Structure formats: structure tokens, C-alpha cells
Amino acid sequence: MLVGAAISVYQHFGACGCDMEETQGAMHVAFYEWDLDMARGLGLDAIRTGVEWGLVEHVEGRINVHWLEFYRRYLSRARELGLAVWATLHHFTNPPWIHRYGGWTNRRVARAYVRYVDRVLAELGDLMDVAVLFNEPSTYALLAYTHGVLPPHHQLDLPGFRRALDNILEAVAEARDVARGYGITTSATHMLGAVSPRGLTARLAAKVIEWLYMREADALRVVDILGVNIYVVTLLRGLRASYVAAPQHVAGAVSRIPGRKAITEAGIATRDHTLKEWYMCMLARSLPEVEAVFWWSLLHGYEWGIGYRPFFALIDVLRDYTRVVTPPARKYASIMRERPGCAVRPLPAPVGDWRTGYA
């Protein structure tokens, strides 16, 4: 099993060229050599990172050779250090021009995405161990077409959500075929959660939620390795949801998925080092057979619309971009590999919003 950590272009690189406002993140684009060196020094043997469509094809039909050259240097450095490279080719962001066509609701955008994947794999595929074709298709479609959080910021556009998700899933299958032509192993990630219901209404809602989780997992089995993103248990009382840190239960849900799989994100937002190490330990105890496990995240960065408050990172990034390795980071790799006999704890009480931080 590979042990690694994950980052995304928008949240950590400091350059995106995409359809969202630029963020500095961790300025990984400038400090990547140091960051990759630190990852290897922490005992990691894999990195999940990203290639950004908005940089590679900021103008429709025009490939930016500068950024392809940057990614070749970048991925080559990871390989030189002995890190297996899992490269995510779409992580919630797009080149701005896709919205002239209605975004992912238009099949033209899906075809453009497949062409982009083809060009990237032709240029960089030899430096990728796994091409992660798309991060959480249904989550992206929900955030863009029903919640209005991501461009094009539609709210309750259910027909748009359905069309976008259908187009994404078809594009992933076509991109999988492209990757196979290059002999490249593929993945796509899927958000999977465990639900703990309280009461009849909650139990019925939990059945629906779990059905939706597994429905997308079934649709994504076209890839070679299904990536699973897991964080917390959703505690349902009626239709009200709260979240508890119980990775042993979440990881157990992964065992229901057949075939090759990896945990492509797992983590907890806290600066309480004891709690973070406990989370790692509980996760390690319950891991089913997986190809790899990636902690979210390697570096402190920007958590989408929430900002810099949530702290998932193994390596802190200060305002002057100084890197500070946290105590849990020094134990993470050995915990995952050795699976120590941590004391089992019951489901804790809800401790806050899993994305903005635990006590």
C-alpha cells in the first residue's frame, strides 16, 4: 500500500488560470522542490497532485507550452525523489471559456475536456503512475448547479445538474479509453460517507443517501482504481445533520466497494495534534485492502469558500510561506504502515463543522 498526501492546484499552487478568483494558497508553484523533498523526508512514497486545465488551455484550442514544460519539470522532480505520482486532471476548476457554452451542461465542453486529457497524457503521461481523471463528479455538479458555490453559480438547477453529471460521467469513460491507449492507469474520485441515523425519518434518509453514494461509485467503476474521499460520519437526527470524527466507521464503508480502490482523501481539520494523531490511528486500524491512502492535505492551503481557517495539513504554511512540519506529520507514514494498536473509542459527540475545525 502506498502512503501519500494530497494537494490541489486551486488550493495550494498559487496559480490556476481557472474560472474562480485566484488564491495564493501555499505558493506550491514556487516552492514545490522543497515541498516534495519534505514529503519524501516524512516517509511518504506517493503524492496526489494536479494538472490544471485552466493553465494548460486558458484560451480555447490553444495549448500553453510554458505550463506543459512546468508540469514536466514538476512531475519529473517527484519521480526523481521516488514519489509515485497520482495526477488529478480536473479538481473542481475549469478554464473560464467553458461558460460561454453553458459549462458542463453542454456536450461540447465534455468533448473539449477529453481533448485536453489526450494532450496532457501525450505530453506528460510517462511521468504519471495514475491519472485521476475527475475529482468527485457529483459533488462538483451539485456545487455548480444546485448550491451555486462554484461557477456558473446556478441554484436549484436540477435539470442542469443532471445534464452536467451525465456529461461528466460520459467524458470520464471516454478519457479512460484515451488513457488506456497510452497504457496509463486511471482513477476518479468519489465522496463516500458513513451515515449514523437516529429515528425513523433519519433511517429512511440514510438509505437514500447511501444509495446515492453507491450509485455514483457504480458509475465510476469504468476506471481502473476507484478513488474514495472519506472524512467523517454524518449523524442524522430527523433531517438535521451534524458530523463526528469517527474514521474507523467511515473507512469501514469502503469495504462495500468491490474491485481496486484507493483512499484518495482522508483527514480532519484541527490544530489539536493529539486528536489528529488519534484520527490517523483509527483510520489505519480499519483500512480495508487499498492500493494507496492519501492524507488531505500535505500543505496548509485555501479551503474553497471557507478560506485559510480549516487546518487539515501535515505541513503548516505561514504567511511568509515558511513551511513548518507538524508533530502528526512525523508519525503519519509509520501509523499507516504499522497500524498500531490504538485504543478503540466509540463514536464521539458532534464536535463542530468538519471543514471549519474541531476543538
Image (cartoon, rainbow, N blue to C red):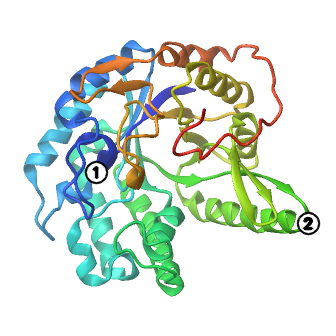
State the separation of the CA atoms marked 1 and 2. 49 Å
The quarter in which the N terminus is drawn is top right
Name the residue rendered at 30%, 49% in the picture.
10
Residue 255 occupies quadrant: top right
Residue 121: give its label: 1
> Residue 20 versus residue 45: which sits nearer the camera?
20
Q: Which mark is residue 170?
A: none
Q: Is residue 81 visible?
A: no
Sort mark 1 into few (<14), some (14-19) or many (20+) by Cα contacts within 10 Å.
many
Residue 73, percent across and down?
17, 33
Q: Are marks 1 and 2 in contact (CB under 8 Å)?
A: no
- The residue under label 2 is 200
Of 30 and 227, nearer the camera is: 30
Can residue 84 be seen from the camera position used here? yes
Mark 1 secondary-structure assignment: helix
The kind of residue on which mark 1 rests is Leu
- The location of residue 213, given as percent across then percent down, is 67, 61
- Compared with 262, 163 (above or below) is below
Horizontally, residue 331 falls left or right of residue 109, namely: right
As rendered, which of 352 and 330 lies closer to the eye? 352
Q: Farthest right residue?
A: 200
Is residue 188 placed above or below 26 in the rendered structure? below
**The quarter of the displayed image where residue 305 is located:** bottom left
Looking at the rendered structure, the secondary structure element under dot 2 is helix
Query: Which residue is painted at 78% across and 57% down in the image?
Result: 236
Residue 113 image position (x, y, % from top left): 31, 67
Please say if 4 is above or below 66.
above
